Image: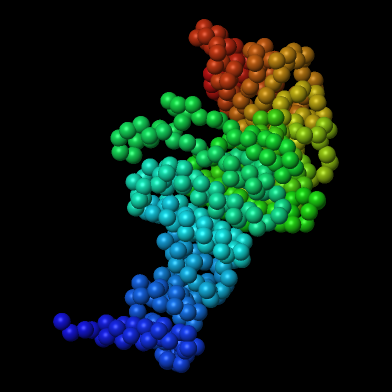
Amino acid sequence: MPLTASQRLTRSLGQRLSSALSRRRTGVSAETLLPIEIWDCVFHELPDGPLLKISTICRVFNSLCMPIYLIRKGIPPESLAAGDLAIPSSLSAALQLSLYTPPIECLSCQFLTYKVPENLASLRNLIRGSPSIRRLELIFNEDLALSHLSGAMVTPFPRQIVPNLFRDIVYAMAQRFAGPVVVVGWQDIFTCRSRDIRSWKIHQFHFCGGLRNYIRRPFGKRCPSHTTIRLHDGASADVRPISSISSVHVYDIPSITRRTSASSTLIVLNHQYITSLVLGYAKDSLRHSIRGAELTVVLPCITLPALYSITLNTDAIDPAVLSQFLARHKSLMSLEYRAVRTPAPAVPLITPTLALPLLTRVSSPDPANILRLLDALDTSPRLSNVRFTFDRGAPSTTALFRRLAQRSADAPLHLQLVLAADGSAVPLTAGERNAAASLACVRSVHLSCPQWEAAQNMLPWLALLPRLEQVDLASLMASAGEEDKTRFTQEVSAALAPAVEVLV
């Protein structure tokens, strides 16, 4: 069969290259065989396999072949020139061969379900050999914690090879920056040291038989609920195991500590699935969660597209930084501010003010802090749910009701009131009666209290709300019997207007 033009060209090129290799020691260069422009035209005609092989012959051929190969694989020339690459994981091995590609600064790598361990190993080697990379993004088509069971490996690998390779990659990136490591997990933002990344525990899985039939521990078998890490200040702490890995972002941020000016490392796990975030320390959050001054540095570097709930445990974040962080998260629906100082500081919590399109709920135990939230967020078009502790006669409660009375009656508001167990049975004062009568925006009230007597003492106040439509006692009635529910419902209905719906 006669050879095609491409095959004749490839054979001729191979003969010339063989001749060049045989005379390598005599100092013959590629330019002496053919001008660079001709080599470039020739290499454009070669298939991918021979092109990669030829790129390993000499530096000149590498500088000509690798851009052709990478552009052929869909990487724009502008991205190559800027060192900002978005590649499939299968290209990481080819990038290791490149000697003249401009230094890579930002690398985004998409992993399919095929050859995950092999591609992770190639990526690890690429990162180790590319000190210029300062921003890394890995996206996995399936949970990386399950990839060792997917059946997509070309050759069998030990069970722990994928977690080990993942830790090696993240560790190699964190080692580039001398400052502490900041980790954003499912809910928390905490710190650790770079060398402790290698001891991270990827949540283990138990194969129970049957194709792709997996049971996550601790169902059936015990699994440690926490792993101990060492913080950047030397203290130890317990963190939750990494239960799944669908993506990871690793990049440098300004230093979060005054002890050093070196950059810190920010690691964001599963950023597209983080729906709630705790900012600052609290008893029920990780005790090593970073605090106000550190959050002022970290928050400008974080964007979480699915975030809809924030619990704020500190007022030490710079108000402008917090405002910018909230403004970037248009999906935010709930903001809870837990009182940190008593009395609340007079300085704004969030500035400048902003209107969040989906924000529906603000919450705080202290009415004074609700005022601080409303000062910044009251223009949010869907804000309709306010939760706080109802303390009769407290100046902060009176001030809050004055503020709510200024809302338009056409902007319905739902109040969630947390009552003390020993709610006052003292008759309402004239000021309290006037405050209740001024709340034309209140359409429904949810009462949360441990005893029926506290809710019973609220009935005279509820009866004064001019446009009340619904009272929810469901949380109070959860443990009551059917007879008690009937009696309580009748008592509430008798105290309120006939049009008010009572939910038990």
Indicate how the structure is coloured in the image.
rainbow
User: Is 6 on the left-hand or right-hand side of 223?
Assistant: left
Q: In which quarter of the image is residue 173?
A: bottom right
Above or below — where is 7 with respect to 396?
below
Above or below — where is 216 with respect to 331?
above
Residue at image position (75%, 33%) is: 339
Q: Position of residue 171 (x, y in %)?
A: 59, 51
Residue at image position (52%, 71%) is: 79
Would you say residue 404 is visible in this rendering?
no
Q: Where is residue 62 in the image (x, y as percent from the top left)?
A: 47, 77
Residue closest to the far left: 1
Above or below — where is 137 with respect to 31?
above
Residue at image position (43%, 25%) is: 220
69 or 402, which is in the foreground? 69
Residue closest to the far front: 25
Q: Where is residue 29 in the image (x, y as percent from the top left)?
A: 48, 88
Would you say residue 396 is visible in this rendering?
yes
312 or 108, which is in the foreground? 108
Residue closest to the far top: 483
Q: In which quarter of the image is residue 366?
A: top right
Which part of the image, by quadrant, shows the N terminus? Answer: bottom left
Q: In which quarter of the image is residue 21?
A: bottom left
Q: Where is residue 102 in the image (x, y as percent from the top left)?
A: 56, 74
Above or below — where is 430 with respect to 190?
above
Residue at image position (75%, 15%) is: 424
